[in-house]
Image (cartoon, coloured by chain):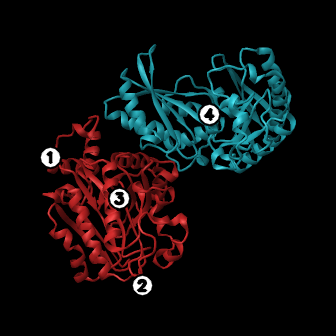
Chain colours: A cyan, B red
Amino acid sequence: MTKIVECVPNYSISGNPAAMEQITLPFQTTKGVHLVNVEGDTSYNRTVVTVIGEPQAVKAAMVESAKIAVECIDMRKHHGEHKRMGAIDVVPFIPIQDMTVEEAVALSEECAKELHEATDIPVFLYSLSAKREQCASLPDIRKGEFEGMAEKLKDPYWKPDFGTAVHPTAGVTAVGCRPLLIAFNIDLNTDNRKIAAAIARMVRYSGGGYRCIQAGPVTLEDKGIVQVTMNVTDFTKTSVYRAFEAVKMEAKRYDVKVIGSEFIGLVSVDCLKDIAAYYLHVASKAEVTLNLEELVAYVSEQLKLHDFDASKVIEYHVH
Amino acid sequence: MTKIVECVPNYSISGNPAAMEQITLPFQTTKGVHLVNVEGDTSYNRTVVTVIGEPQAVKAAMVESAKIAVECIDMRKHHGEHKRMGAIDVVPFIPIQDMTVEEAVALSEECAKELHEATDIPVFLYSLSAKREQCASLPDIRKGEFEGMAEKLKDPYWKPDFGTAVHPTAGVTAVGCRPLLIAFNIDLNTDNRKIAAAIARMVRYSGGGYRCIQAGPVTLEDKGIVQVTMNVTDFTKTSVYRAFEAVKMEAKRYDVKVIGSEFIGLVSVDCLKDIAAYYLHVASKAEVTLNLEELVAYVSEQLKLHDFDASKVIEYHVH
């Protein structure tokens, strides 16, 4: 199998198609790299780009893109609702296929070094790539935002892993390996938000639930139902079928049924195989032999998924 | 309702009924205190005493018991398989009824201070009573054991909360508030230990499972089956019905069924009401109106419990 990495850089810009075309050009022209998605949010004034491909090619294209972004974005003029500390705010690398976490961490370190050398932006290694405890959490690094970074970086505790002084127009960047985050919502046959909130509390880690589940309630006014909305922060530890089965189990207390579910954003073949393995009664995903189309159909049926097809699977975009 | 606290002191002694009679005498003679259980283990050379009752009375009896234990136990002559650092090795306080964690922490602090003043044994506040991060985990405090404590306590990092020097014959004691630990085993209709191990991995925290579940496999040679053996370290966060339902759910993958379960040691009314509330389809334990006998019968039926009766419920022993 080919090694595949996903990279999801967040740029502090939106509503500027010409600039985004420039910034994403390396992802469109570098061999072995596939541009999957570009999603801007104007109230956030932020654009999230999803790229996958061969690790070294993705890294090289990412560094090229950063060089262009530094020219296009001036943080001194940036306003937006989302917290941010730099033009290339964060660059997460996610191992997708035939790649260990250690390999993805090493790739992120190379990227951080090269990105710093090419742009003079100071870089923090964060999440699984963090070298120091205080750098594991992105919100902790980002606290103070662009405007507060010059002061913050004077403290040796907040010395970046590469570089020292804040870039005058591009701020600071965080680069790191993190697990693939699965955003997963479950529909209940009730409009009682309190029930969704109670179930969310029971399945999420903070309420004594599963280790890698974050969850909350959401009301879908148009459908007249509520959802339990979840992030599965590491499906290799807490597989998604457990999130689904746990919500079904907790819903019984309220005589409520699960009537559907949906993935928001992309999932991976491994994530789907993990789910399929449970319902197929086999011990591990290695024993799941379904092809992509079959896998999508089978998991859709088991989880009552709507709005799901092969194009929502990361690996689909490699071909 | 009356405030009830449980206290489970561990003494570094066993196989000496006369000494244990002395050491437990304050629990037998103090008004408002009930001696529930005395269980010695000769290979551990350790005796675990379970006491419940009115908080101030339990604390006073505990200090009296410690004064006697210091006279009876000489750690310089103590050998046993269980790690230990003192004659009164650890004194956990567990809030059982109408008592907050804060109140139990305050009680443990009073006990630690009075125990030190009465015996000259240095005391660490541990678990939920810990004042410093390094004191939260009992195994961390205990590392080095009795023989290594004199050296260990020279390091200011390991300064006890009360006292300074190791007691020459009684060592060091840890006192603190901790949640009630529920030991719960689930029987599977298979003798395949690998299946119990795989299920244990999926339900326990370290494998991505529930926050407050520790689990492993065990083989019951006499019955020809395996069990998933679990500690629910805080049932107020991870209720026991979730442990049961999660094991049932994971077992389906292997076409295995849950055929029974058992509690090891004591449970509390609150723990049982939490379980009953789920199966009764009510939102919380406050809505469960069953009396003790009814509660025991109902939960036994739902969890297929064996070897369980009212005498295994802590509050039963108050009357």
Q: Nearer the viewer, mark 1 or mark 2?
A: 2
* Type of amino acid at the residue the image marks with label 1: Asn
* Type of amino acid at the residue the image marks with label 4: Val
Q: CA distance from mark 2 to mark 3?
A: 28 Å
Classify mark 1: helix, strand or loop.
loop
Q: Position of residue A27 (x, y in %)?
A: 81, 28
Q: Nearer the viewer, mark 4 or mark 2?
A: 2
Q: CA distance from mark 3 to mark 1?
A: 34 Å
- What residue is pinned by disc 4? A267
Q: Quadrant of the C terminus of chain B?
A: bottom left
Classify mark 3: helix, strand or loop.
helix
Q: Position of residue A259 (x, y in %)?
A: 42, 26
* Type of amino acid at the residue the image marks with label 2: Arg
Q: Which mark is residue A93?
A: none
Q: Which mark is residue B109?
A: 3
Q: Position of residue A243 (x, y in %)?
A: 47, 38
Q: Are marks 4 and 1 on the same chain?
A: no
Q: CA distance from mark 3 to mark 4?
A: 50 Å
